[in-house]
Amino acid sequence: MTTAFHVRPCIEWGVATQALPGQSVSGDAYLVESLADGALVAVVDGLGHGDEATSAALTAVAILRENAGLPVVALVQRCHQALIQTRGAVVTVASFNSLEGTLSWLSVGNVAGLLLRANSKAIPPIESAILRGGLVGYQLPALRDSVIPVSTGDLLLLASDGISSGFEQGVIATDRPQEIADRIMSRHFKGNDDALALVVRYLGIRHE
Ligand SMILES: [Mn+2]
């Protein structure tokens, strides 16, 4: 007997974006890409704003999409090579592995990354991506990913610096990711920069 498993995406997600007032395009961009045994998500903030920032951010997103199955360190290295001719960008990339139940993440610059644990007794209840100074396409710090266990229901929040810090406060973790992203934007948009909030809930392995 052969059994064909259809594996559904291991995440659900929502995103909210807002350009700097007066700008028609945002220099912030994101990626959500399903993998055979996981998913890659990222938020990219092109330096400055306007068309050149958008170009840098979209170049990075294209590289991430084309190479989504690679480890996050290799992804950032490839983005760096591709962005040398651009203004550069800051980026946080996070790769879920649903076979191992892990999240591997890496930040260059100041795109905030937080993982809110579904288990209210988890210690710590919130994990933060380690933010290292640098600019992809210009100057990379030493690249090392962090790998942490991830459990069904855990909530990953990625936010560009157009979102004020403390944005995780008031998040109702049981809400739909799109509702959470919209509320973060309405409450924490600074107004002096492009802003993007990506909210991802890990669902674990789901066969059907
Ligand atoms: Mn920014």
Image (cartoon, rainbow, N blue to C red):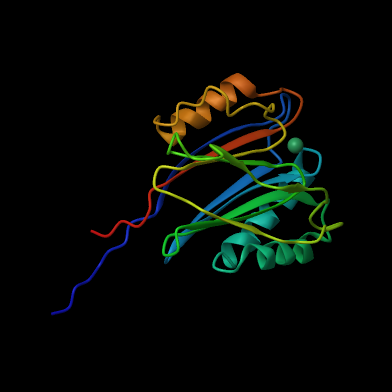
Q: Position of residue 80 (x, y in %)?
A: 77, 62
The quadrant of the picture showing ligand 1 is: top right
Q: Is residue 54 above or below residue 105?
A: above
Most extreme residue toward the left, as rendered?
1
- Which of the image's four quarters has the N terminus? bottom left
- Which of the image's four quarters has the C terminus? bottom left
| Closer to us: 201 or 103 | 103
Which residue: 72% across, 30% down? 23
Q: Position of residue 174 (x, y in %)?
A: 39, 31
Number of numbered discs on residues: 0
Which residue: 56% across, 26% down? 184
Q: Is residue 45 above or below residue 17?
A: below
Which residue: 76% across, 25% down? 192
Q: Position of residue 178 (x, y in %)?
A: 45, 33
| Closer to us: 148 or 200 | 148
Left-right relation of 38 to 65 = left
Q: Is residue 55 visible?
A: no
Q: Position of residue 199 (x, y in %)?
A: 51, 39
Most extreme residue toward the right, as rendered?
139
Left-right relation of 100 to 20 = left
Q: Is residue 65 above or below residue 15?
A: below
Which residue: 56% across, 64% down? 68
Q: Is residue 194 visible?
A: yes
Most extreme residue toward the top, as rendered?
187
